[in-house]
Image: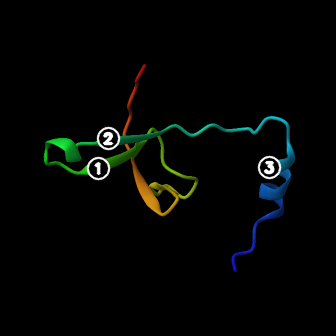
Amino acid sequence: MQDIPQETHHETTRLTQSAQVVLWEIDLTEVGGERYFFCNEQNEKGEPVTWQGRQYQAYPIQGT
């Protein structure tokens, strides 16, 4: 089991969290392609963001 840092415990109990992460999934499987996962930034270690076992590569994207 992984130890959760005390700072993370405090962050989850705040009314508003200090950061927002935007994750993008581009699914091209309907046209014979693959699924791609992107995030506008890297994590604090300078690596791709990982969420629910998927790596989101850093790539600047804007959408509406």
Provide the residue designation for mark 1. 35
Q: Residue 9: x, y in percent?
A: 82, 57
In the rendered image, which quarter contains the C terminus? top left
* Cα separation between marks 3 and 2: 29 Å
Q: Secondary structure at mark 1?
A: strand
| Residue at 75% over, 39% down | 17
Picture quarter containing residue 16? top right
Q: Residue 19: x, y in percent?
A: 67, 38
Picture quarter containing residue 20? top right
Q: Is residue 21 above or below residue 62?
A: below
* Amino acid marked by disc 2: Ile
Q: Secondary structure at mark 2?
A: strand
* Amino acid marked by disc 3: Thr
**CA neighbours of label 3 inside 10 A, class few (<14), some (14 to 19), many (20+):** few
Provide the residue designation for mark 3. 12
Q: Residue 47: x, y in percent?
A: 46, 57
* Cα separation between marks 1 and 2: 6 Å
Provide the residue designation for mark 2. 26
* The one of 42 and 29 positioned closer to us in this rendering: 29
Is 61 left or right of 27, judged from the image as shown?
right
Q: Residue 49: x, y in percent?
A: 49, 53
Is 41 left or right of 3, judged from the image as shown?
left
* Sequence-earlier tag: 1 or 2: 2
* Sequence-earlier tag: 3 or 2: 3
- 3 or 1: mark nearer the eye: 1
- 3 or 2: mark nearer the eye: 2
| Residue at 31% over, 48% down | 36
* Cα separation between marks 3 and 1: 30 Å
| Residue at 38% over, 34% down | 60
